[in-house]
Image (tube, rainbow, N blue to C red):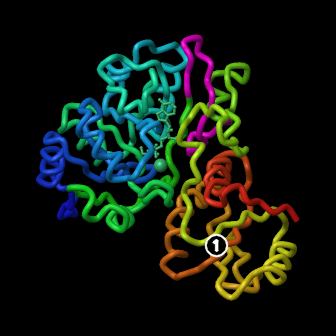
Amino acid sequence: MTYATKLLSPSEEDIAAAAEMLKNGEVVGIPTETVYGLAANALNETAVAKIFAAKGRPADNPLIVHISRFEDIYNYAEYVPENAKLLAELFWPGPMTMILRKKECIPYITSGGLDTVGLRFPANITARRIIDKCGFPLAAPSANLSGSPSPTSAVHVMDDMQGRISAVVDGGSCEVGVESTVISVSDEGKVCLLRPGFITLEELTEAVEEDNVTVAKGVTECVSDGERVLSPGMKYKHYSPKANVTVVKGDIDSFSDYIAAHGGDNCAAMVFDGDEDKCPCRCISYGSTGEQQAQRLFSLLRKADEKGIDQIYVRCPEQSGVGLAVYNRLLRAAGFEVISL
Ligand code: TXA
Ligand code: MG
């Protein structure tokens, strides 16, 4: 089915229009503070099926369920351990998704066949107004076509989803730029980091004590085919532009020498602030801090495609703080191709 995808504003009237479409079981692109989401009624199987179709997403990859009130955690999670309450109080509303045992009302199509549900209370005001207006939770994966970089503006969503969904609400560019931190919290209160994000491993560890936090293998390592992954989304090649991406570890001089020796005509480099004139190719900074790099990463990868670049060399970010999230996304964009100099 082809849709005449409408571009809506965050005005009262347009939010009401978006909520009406969602009530009718349609799919709408919505802004959040992390990336844009492809939203539908999380409790309606037919509506959720349309998300999978629009994205081309594998059916075993569960969707995050977005809520707009703390108390909703009790409506959709079967059991809420103390540590989950504590983390929700500290980091919600905000870029953190908590995986808990699901209540029956969450359909299996939404949870990718699992008995758990990923819950997120976003900070973005437009997202919250839309959820409030609907009166039901919204299932929403990132609003990109499966495999490509997540969208951080309404234009990106239109580029991927025009004709595939009913509308996109334009809420400007996303402040965070990478998807939420995903953690699972067991009934005993043990926390496992499945996907790093703006809420950092350091912050989680400080909140619930080190003994209670582990990091899933897929965060910084390649999980081989057939191996069980805790977060199904982590096993797919992901976030990749059409260009080949290579992560390069080393100082700027060896990075630059590497490009001089290996870079072809149509390559580009992504470096840190101040290094832009030190590379023998088209070069752009993606910032110096993890926060800046997160904010710019996906939009720069999309820009490289618009310019027809075939190879991007990226200087490896720090692997701590928000940098760990940037590193995690880059590894997947690069299909785990990392060169250490
Ligand atoms: O910031 C975000 O999280 C954005 C915005 C729109 O909220 N959403 C997002 O959704 O990134 P998505 O579907 O692109 O990524 C969700 C990740 C996937 O890796 C998925 O496998 C994992 O979370 N996930 C969701 N529910 C899960 C569950 N019940 N168990 C394990 N992993 C789950
Ligand atoms: Mg995604």
- The residues colored magenta run 184-201
Residue 334, position as x, y percentages in the image: 66, 60
Instruction: Identify which residue is drawn at 38% across, 49% down.
Output: 32
Farthest front residue in view: 226
Three-letter residue code for mark 1: Ser
Q: Is residue 270 above or below residue 124?
A: below
Residue at the spot x=33%, y=49% of the render?
Answer: 53
Count the numbered circles shown: 1
Does 186 appear above or below 154? above
As rendered, which of 322 and 54 lies closer to the eye?
Answer: 54
Residue 333 image-quadrant placement: bottom right
> Left of 10 or right of it: where is 216?
right
Residue at 29% over, 34% down:
42
Image spot of residue 88 (x, y percent) = 47, 26
202 or 151, nearer to the observer: 151
Q: Is residue 45 left or right of residue 252?
A: left
Residue 188 colored in magenta in the image: yes
Q: Which residue is mark 1?
A: 285
**What percent of the width, then of the height, locates residue 55?**
38, 53
Q: Is ligand 1 closer than 8 angstroms to the Cβ of mark 1?
A: no
Q: Quadrant of residue 93?
A: top left
Quarter of the image holding residue 309? bottom right
Relative to 151, say whether 282 is above or below: below
Label 1 crowd (10 A; few <14 / some 14-19 / many >=20): many
Residue 275 shown left or right of residue 290 in the figure:
right
- Whether the magenta-drawn stretch holds residue 121 is answered as no
Residue 169 in view here: no
The quarter of the picture where the C terminus appears is bottom right
